[in-house]
Amino acid sequence: MVVFLTVCALVVIVLYKQIWTAFLANAVLNGVIIFVLAIGIALAFRQVIRLFPEIDWVNGFRLADPGLAVERPPVLLRADGRATA
């Protein structure tokens, strides 16, 4: 995700003048679009970061000896299907 955003930022830097001219054609609408895009990017990163503890749990569960008790249950992978925030 970071690599993709870096490539996009490089394209924006290269095409800065053309993008700025197009942005000024309707600055309010384009500003709202960029704001919503930024919120979407932040939420996508948040969702991926939330998965890290679950990945650690699955890897620990997979590598554990049979019969070992699990220290902490997963939050997003709950057995009853309910996810907590």
Image (cartoon, helix red, strand yellow):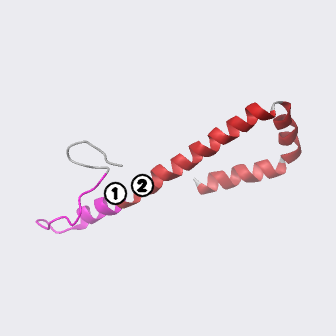
Q: Residue at coordinates 83% horizontally, 41% vertically from top-left?
A: 19
In the image, 4 versus 40, the foreground residue is: 40
Residue at the disc numbered 1:
54
How far apart, in angstroms, are the residues tagged by discs 2 and 1?
8 Å
68 in the magenta segment: yes
Callout 1: helix, strand or loop?
Answer: helix
Residue 16 located left or right of residue 46: right
Q: Residue at coordinates 81% horizontally, 30% vertically from top-left?
A: 26
Residue at the disc numbered 2:
50
Seen as rendered, the residue at the extreme left is 67
Q: What residue type is labelled 1?
A: Glu
Q: Residue at coordinates 69% horizontally, 40% vertically from top-left?
A: 34
Give the vertical position of 23 relative to 57 (above or below). Answer: above
Q: Where is residue 68? Give x, y as percent.
A: 14, 68
Residue 48 located left or right of residue 68: right
Q: Residue at coordinates 73% horizontally, 52% vertically from top-left?
A: 9
Residue 10 located left or right of residue 69: right
Q: Which amino acid does label 2 sit on?
A: Arg
